[in-house]
Amino acid sequence: MTQPLLANWNGVEQPLDEVRVSVLDRGFLFGDGGYEVLRIYGGRLFLLDEHMQRLVRSLDKLRIAADVPRIERRLRETLAHSGVVEGMAYLQVTRGEAPRMHRFPPGNPHPNELIYIAPLAGDPYGDARETGAAVLTTPDVRWGRCDIKSINLLANCLAAQAAAEAGCQEALLVAEDGAIVEGSHTSVFGVKDGAIWTTPLGPHILPGITRGLVLRLAARAGISVVEKSLHTRELGEIDELFLTGTTSEVLPVTTVDGRPIGNGRPGPVTRRLAETYRQVVDEMLAGPAS
Ligand code: PLP
């Protein structure tokens, strides 16, 4: 029998499948909330400060008043009690429960806070990391504030489902002008003549925590960075393409819409960044517990 996942629901630890939430929760009714996903390596929360800062920012933009230092304390406690060594942590904060109305409810309900810890058996992208992932392109039909990590993910879910039905690992979201914005749950990078290209930060992309780390690693490795979106018409001219994300880490992409990128194999720049990513994880594991 598989072990039930451990959750912390508004400060109370309990099995995830026993958590109950009101149908009047505004996350349930409107998608009115923010979230984070963190990777756990060797029982430690990777890039914890960066994730907490982004949660603070998302909740601030959504005008949800939650005690994020308290959420961080509960996250650490729940992880310790879960015993999970390799896995992920999910955090979600909604505006709470109130009679249904679009405007914020008078008197501001208490936010509903969910944390749960899930083990990961092996690397979910292990095969694709070696052979390269296949992706498809699809129009980006999301709203204009994709920099906020909100739980409104319908367009992302539809895009990810289209990718899965086509036998692909991810969907690249494409703007009306043909610019590749980001993936349904990943950031996107191209490599041309040894330099990496990625969409600049702004309202149309999530400021990916892994994206930020990879840009720092590129600077450390002397790889030049061009913060400019790749265009679909440039896909035939680039040497490599890769995705980054909390669970996908640094993932090479070898075909887009069935057409090969570069020589159709994971390229050297992607491999180098994937290796340096691993080194950062190892450095964290060798360092003092935070
Ligand atoms: N872009 C989108 C739309 C995402 O949903 C995610 C992660 O879920 C990412 C990028 C990657 O972000 P991170 O590296 O913080 O996991």
Image (cartoon, helix red, strand yellow):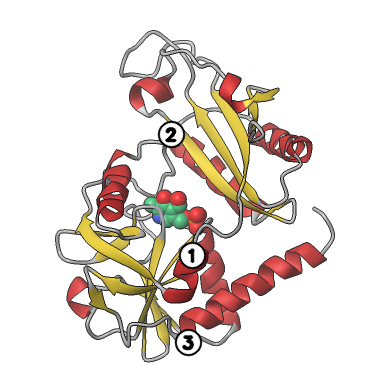
Nearer to the camera, 141 or 263:
263
Quick one: SS at disc 2?
Answer: helix
Nearer to the camera, 101 or 84:
84
Q: Which mark is residue 62?
A: 2
| Mark 1 closeness class: few <14, some 14–19, many ≥20 residues within 10 Å | many
- Cα separation, mark 1 vs mark 3, equals 18 Å
- Cα separation, mark 3 vs mark 2, equals 40 Å
Q: Earlier along the polypeptide chain: callout 3 or callout 2?
A: 2
- Left or right: where does residue 234 sit relative to residue 16? left
- Nearer the observer, disc 1 or disc 3? 3
- Cα separation, mark 1 vs mark 2, equals 23 Å
Residue furthest to the bottom: 193
Q: Is residue 255 above or below residue 110?
A: below
Q: Is residue 208 above or below residue 234?
A: above
Q: Which residue is mark 1?
A: 211
- Left or right: where does residue 123 sit relative to residue 289? left
Q: Which amino acid type is marked by label 2? A: Leu
Q: Which residue is mark 3?
A: 268
Q: Is residue 222 above or below residue 172?
A: below
Q: Are marks 1 and 2 in contact (CB under 8 Å)?
A: no
